[in-house]
Amino acid sequence: MRVPLRVRCWDGLDRLAMVLMSTMQIPTTRVDKATCKQIFRDYGEAFWQRYGHYFDANVCEVVDKMLGCGDLASGYSTYRCEHCQEMKRVAFSCKSSFCLSCCKVYIDEWVSHIGRTLYEGVPYRHVVLTVPDVIRMPFFHDRSLLADLMKCGVQMLSEALSWFKKVSLQVGYVVVLETAGRAGNWNPHLHILMTSGGVTPKNRWQAVNYFPYDELGRPKTPFLGQIRCPIFGLGLIAQ
């Protein structure tokens, strides 16, 4: 039995949207597409003036696509009835994952993909990993480090389970990277859906019904010395 490692990076525009929406009174009802667009039109310029260090050409491009979604000025297709000759114009969608309408397609595809990835009858657990404040901004300036963060998180959990069960385990993971906290601040963290167990070198399934979370925070935990190396190897802080 082989449990594959699957890693997905979801580095979206959550921070920008959350900061913009935090300047308004959040309604109790769900924000629709038109309301979301209006928020960006009304407060987008003020946001860039105040948080210019967040400026990124890729972010601006995605926001512009979202604002032009469903707008005839951004392009359209023309349809004509063969009987009455009436013509109708249908505006193009932006097909952006940041758009409240178009993202529905990506969400459905993602949910379907996860459903096909998970193994029937195998228990899973949800783990959230983050990094200290002191090393967050280097990840903002060099986004390639986010891939190292994902690999390090997976390595740490694999080493933890192997150390706890006293046998090398190959564990299955679905890793989602998020770069914003609830307050809209820059806070790269990982949401990891992992199998509650793994495959031994003899291709036997070893269940892990109890996970020693408390042990992960103890400085003298044996495997932590090996896991720290990749973090310090990024050159972010001195060992």
Image: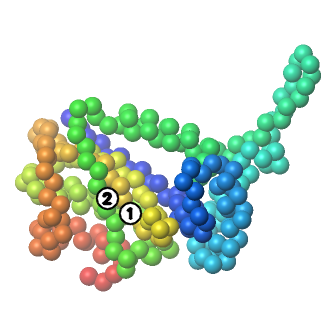
Q: Residues within 10 Å of mark 1 (few under 14, many from 20)?
A: many
Which quarter of the picture shows residue 215? bottom left
Q: Is residue 167 above or below residue 17?
A: above
User: Badge 2 local density, few (<14 within 10 Å), some, or many (20+)?
Assistant: few
Q: Quadrant of residue 153?
A: bottom left
Give the distance between the C-alpha atoms of the residues marked 2 and 1, in whole angstroms.
7 Å
User: Could you tell me which residue is drawn at 15 percent across and 74 percent down?
Assistant: 219
Q: Which residue is mark 1?
A: 189
In the picture of the structure, the residue carrying the numbered disc 2 is: 128
Q: Residue at x 44, y 71 (%)?
A: 139
Residue 97 at least partly seen: no
Q: Is residue 112 above or below residue 210?
A: above
Tell me the element at label 2.
Answer: strand
Residue farthest along the front direction in this orientation: 28
Mark 1 lies on a secondary structure that is strand
* Front residue of 48 and 229: 48
**Quadrant showing the N terminus:** top left
Q: Provide residue 11's location: percent of width, then percent of height.
A: 49, 58
Q: Percent from the top left, x then y, of residue 227?
A: 22, 67
Please state which amino acid type lies under the numbered disc 2. Val
Q: Is residue 183 left or right of residue 98?
A: left
**Which of the colour schemes (rainbow, by chain, secondary structure, one colour) is used?**
rainbow
